[in-house]
Amino acid sequence: MKTVKLKAYPRTLEGRSGSKKVRSRGRVPAVIYGKGVPTRTIEVVLKEWITALKEAGAENFMVELTIEGEEAKPCLAFVREAQHHPLSGQLLHLDFHEVDPYEKVTITVPVETVGEAVGVKSGGVLEQVLHKLRVRALPKDLPEVIRIDVSNLNVGQVIHLGDIVPPSGVEILGDKTLPVVAVTMPEVEETTAAPTAAPAPGEVEMIKEKKPVAGAEEETEKGAKKEQ
């Protein structure tokens, strides 16, 4: 997994009003926390953060944070959360989770398929059931993505979680029987119109008849007498 370097600065302005002042200076308020380490409030320069994102070029990456004024070596961290304004999209806050380089961590990584399945060439459809997987490894061994070769997958075949061979030093977590990718045949919709249902045996088909108009029968009899 790629690691990008980022400089941070101790934050002295706290609270909502303090965070607004930090942002007005072109910086982003942030916090660093982790197992067995004290929580620290910091701020990073927004332009430098945008540059780090472009350099990473991936959904998952690690950050090597150097905090101004601290003589200790840089800390290694993941971005646990990046809070944005719901309307403007402005970056409001960053949460960094510090990790030990020599301790295994668990993260979620995306799944990508590689190649064209033979079943797709014969008319099937490739269905990806899981788009992300949970993996565990040392920070240096963590993958940015898990790639699955589907070239030999035929119609009706499935790749389960237990079928995936992870990179060296990486453990894929979860139920090994879960389907990840499959090739199925597309469903064909029937367009034939259904025949009109005939009355079932024993049922009486009701036929409406016109009611005679009142007085019509009497007029008919009078007309018959005149003809006589």
Image (cartoon, rainbow, N blue to C red):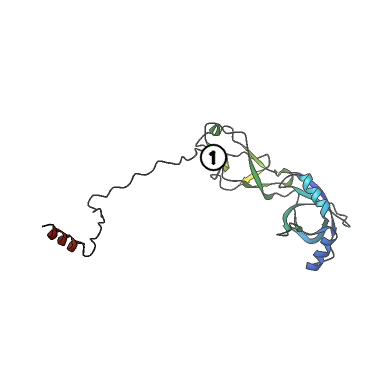
Residue drawn at 56 percent across, 47 percent down: 175
Check the image and report above or below for 151 versus 223: above
Q: Quadrant of residue 95 in the image?
A: bottom right
Camera-nearest residue between 133 and 26: 26
Judge from the rendering whether residue 70 lies leftward or rightward of residue 181; answer left or right.
right
Neighbor class of circle 1 (other Cα within 10 Å; few <14, some 14-19, many 20+) is many
Quarter of the N terminus within the rendering: top right
Residue drawn at 79 percent across, 44 percent down: 55
Quarter of the C terminus within the rendering: bottom left
Residue 78: percent from left, percent from top: 74, 52
Check the image and report above or below for 33 versus 16: above
Assign a secondary structure to mark 1.
strand
Q: Quadrant of residue 172 in the image?
A: top right
Residue 131: percent from left, percent from top: 61, 46
**Mark 1 belongs to which amino acid?**
Ala
- Residue beneath disc 1: 182
Q: Specify whether residue 111 is in view.
A: yes
Residue drawn at 78 percent across, 46 percent down: 54
Q: Specify whether residue 159 is in view.
A: no
